[in-house]
Image: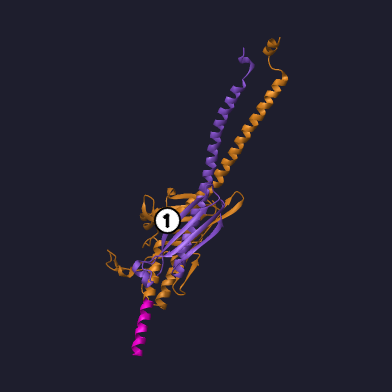
Chain colours: A purple, B orange
Amino acid sequence: MSNRKGFTLVELLIAVTILAVGLVGVLRAYCILINGLEVAQHTIDASLFLKEKIVGLERCALEQGSIPPGSSEDKLSTVSGALRWESQVEMLKSESSATKKVPAYGLDKVEIKVYMDALKPPRKLTLATYVEVNE
Amino acid sequence: MSKSMNKKGFTLIELAVASMLLAVVGLAIVSTFTGGLKVYYRLRDNVSARTEILMSLDRMERDLKNTYTDRKIFFHGEPKKIAFPAVLTLRGPGRATYYYDDYKKALFKKEEDYARVVSEVSARDQDIKMLAAISDIEFSYYYYDENTKMYGWKSSWTEDSVAKKKNDEKTSSSAKENSDLGDRGEVKRINIKTGKEEEDETFPSPIGVKIKLAYKDGEKNVAIERFVLIPLSVSKQLSELKKLKKEKEKEAEEKAKDAKAAAQ
């Protein structure tokens, strides 16, 4: 008889809570998915930029004989958003040649970092490699 | 009385309210689904098109970086077509050809194994694969000009251009040996049948290739540009430059010695 009257407030609250918990789980899964997509897109753009940069440096090494040492940084806008990069070029010297001021290996050490600041949390992609130079 | 009323059924108003509620909920569900489907179709058409293009560019880049110089297969470059010796997946050495089909508006790849190329058998249907739908492509070839000592670009890289180059070398600088073919002069090849020495001809690849590619993303045109340096040619070029540099240094040293001797 009392059942026919309807739900009590407590029953309703419990039902709503259970539903809320379930919904939050589903929505969070969506959120993570979208976040993952964004990270992937940024990473693709960053790696494409790294490729381009490395080829540019190799070309510079070919045409000018060496890569100007030192660090540089800049921003760039891509399909997915703005990125920030830093690069550092260092002449590779052996210990004995450090005194003679002659690079011994004909290699330049190159390190490029791409920062994906638009992401939360921000991510970083680093490439460290050696480029053959004419020295 | 109230019990019997309830048992009779729903009133019109109740039904209307119920159906309205149902309609609202149904509409919400349907609109969510259509929105989701729209997103799905957009992703499938645009993002996967971009992915396909990026993947085919990566393939091209990998093949170009693994190219080698060969006696039977030459590097052949045109503005919309490129063919070169490559290492084919599961089939070993052969020739890879990438070309743009203007009629089908797509990028194609042709893979021929070594035996087929040498015996000049045409490619089978399964050797040709469509890579991605694009709207245009342009290859340009990066090379080192021996005469001007400058790097430049060519819109095509064919045997004619090198034949000319060879003649130029023979006439202009006969003293300079093995200028761009490394140590090929040291190898002698003798034909088994005739017993005569065969001219050992290889054809150099360019130092790099620039790929300019355009595709349509919905209604806007998107362009991608990629520059690929061929490691073999780059190291050859670098060793060439190093040789030149050493020679110059030697000359400078000798000059300095001569100057000293003259001063004494």
**Residue B256, visible in the rendered structure:** yes
The structure residue drawn at horizontal position 45% and vertical position 56%, both measured from the top left corner, is A127
Residue at numbered disc 1: B63
Q: In the rendered view, would you say A82 is above or below B246?
A: above
The structure residue drawn at horizontal position 52% and vertical position 61%, both measured from the top left corner, is A73
Q: Nearer the viewer, residue B196 or A117?
A: A117
Q: Secondary structure at mark 1?
A: helix
Let me know if residue B250 is in the magenta part: yes
Task: Find residue B264 and report its horizontal and vertical position in percent.
Answer: 33, 90
Let me know if residue A99 is in the magenta part: no
Chain designation of label 1: B
Task: Find residue B209 and report its horizontal and vertical position in percent.
Answer: 47, 61
Task: Find residue B3 and report its horizontal and vertical position in percent.
Answer: 68, 11
The structure residue drawn at horizontal position 69% and vertical position 21%, both measured from the top left corner, is B15
Q: Is the N terminus of chain B in the top left, top right, bottom left or bottom right quadrant?
A: top right
Q: In the rendered view, would you say B174 is above or below B42?
A: below
Residue extent of the magenta highlight = B247-264
Q: Looking at the magenta stretch, what is its main secondary structure?
A: helix
The structure residue drawn at horizontal position 62% and vertical position 22%, both measured from the top left corner, is A9
Of all residues, the one furthest to the right in this rendering is B13
Q: Nearer the viewer, residue B140 or B188?
A: B140
Task: Find residue A46 and report its horizontal and vertical position in percent.
Answer: 50, 53
